[in-house]
Image: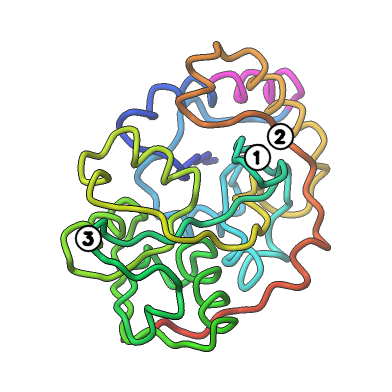
């Protein structure tokens, strides 16, 4: 069996994430649900999502919609404490360099966008939808593998803009010096945030209770490090209006 909590994981948050998992694990076991001692930080996220012995993980809403909706159970959505965004949702910030004077997305027609992955809602799905609404197309997509690397690519002038999950942007501003060379020029409409999931079709209630209990038991400083203000029950209907984006330009 396996458990992963890959989203928002970075060196500064790893210890807090492990503490969160320890509380979840113990509460799952108290409920009669087997759970591994530690998180697996080595397995690729999509591989973990497809495992029949997955106890708990997090999944972005785009890969859930296009490949895993019938293979996993939605357990909970996070309240990330994002201003102007309701609990259970998130948004992306559109960033450019501080010396780039373009102010609207329409001005980035033909530009190079850095994205963490083509199946990322925050990194590609949301900006692709925003570009369609603005009536523009990007000239090139630079796939970086991580939001922080997308932001770094913009700071280093290897890309013109990027869409960064707002919770990740909060961490980048806190810990990455290159953030000083970046600015937010817009934000995307909110969509359902990264969901906690378990494999197969299960009753989500005991898993959600374990998450809630573990979160409530964390010290305030630890909760602040993982950026989690609370949890809400998922609403599958909230995903129905979201489109699948085209492949990013090469």
- Quadrant where the image shows the C terminus: bottom left
Q: Using the image, determine if residue 142 lies above or below residue 33.
A: below
Examine the residues drawn in magenta and state their main secondary structure.
helix
- Front of the two marks 2 and 3: 3
Residue 202 place in picture, x, y as percent:
79, 47
Query: In this rendering, does residue 249 appear at all?
Result: no
| Residue 21 locus on image (x, y percent) | 54, 26
Res 157 visible: yes
Q: Earlier in the sequence, mark 1 or mark 2?
A: 1
Q: Is residue 117 above or below residue 167?
A: below
Q: Indicate left or right for 162 with 47 as reference.
A: left
**Tag 1 or tag 3, which sits nearer the N-term?**
1
Judging by the rendered image, the residue that carries numbered circle 2 is 231
Q: Which mark is residue 99?
A: 3
Residues shaded magenta: 22-32
Q: Viewer-nearest of labels 3 and 1?
A: 3
Q: 5 left or right of 173?
A: right
Residue 191 in the image: state x and y as whole percent: 66, 59
Report the residue at 64% width, 20% height from top.
Answer: 214
Mark 1 touches mark 2? (CB < 8 Å): yes
Q: CA distance from mark 3 to mark 1?
A: 34 Å
Query: Observer-nearest residue: 35 or 109?
Result: 109
Q: Residue at x 72, y 44 (%)?
A: 86
Instruction: Please report the residue visible at 55 percent of the width from the left and 68 percent of the height from the top.
Output: 126
What residue did someone put label 1 on? 78
């Amino acid at each position: 069996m396996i458990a992963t909590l890959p989203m928002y994981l970075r060196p500064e948050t790893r210890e807090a994430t492990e503490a969160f998992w320890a509380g979840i694990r113990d509460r799952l076991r108290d409920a009669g649900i087997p759970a591994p001692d530690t998180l697996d930080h080595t397995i690729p996220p999509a591989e973990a999502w497809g495992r029949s012995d997955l106890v708990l993980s997090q999944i972005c809403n785009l890969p859930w919609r296009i490949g895993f909706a019938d293979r996993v159970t939605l357990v909970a959505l996070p309240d990330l404490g994002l201003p102007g965004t309701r609990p259970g949702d998130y948004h992306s910030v559109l960033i450019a360099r501080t010396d780039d004077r373009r102010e609207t997305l329409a001005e980035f027609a033909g530009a190079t966008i850095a994205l963490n992955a083509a199946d990322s809602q925050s990194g590609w799905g949301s900006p692709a939808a925003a570009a369609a609404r603005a009536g523009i197309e990007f000239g090139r997509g630079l796939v970086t593998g991580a939001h922080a690397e997308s932001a770094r690519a913009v700071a280093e002038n290897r890309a013109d803009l990027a869409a960064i999950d707002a919770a990740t942007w909060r961490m980048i501003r806190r810990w990455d010096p290159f953030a000083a060379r970046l600015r937010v020029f817009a934000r995307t409409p909110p969509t359902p945030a990264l969901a906690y999931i378990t494999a197969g079709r299960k009753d989500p209630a005991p898993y959600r209770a374990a998450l809630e209990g573990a979160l409530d038991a964390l010290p305030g400083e630890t909760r602040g490090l993982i950026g989690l203000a609370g949890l809400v029950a998922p609403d599958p209907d909230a995903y129905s209006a979201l489109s699948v984006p085209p492949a990013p330009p090469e």
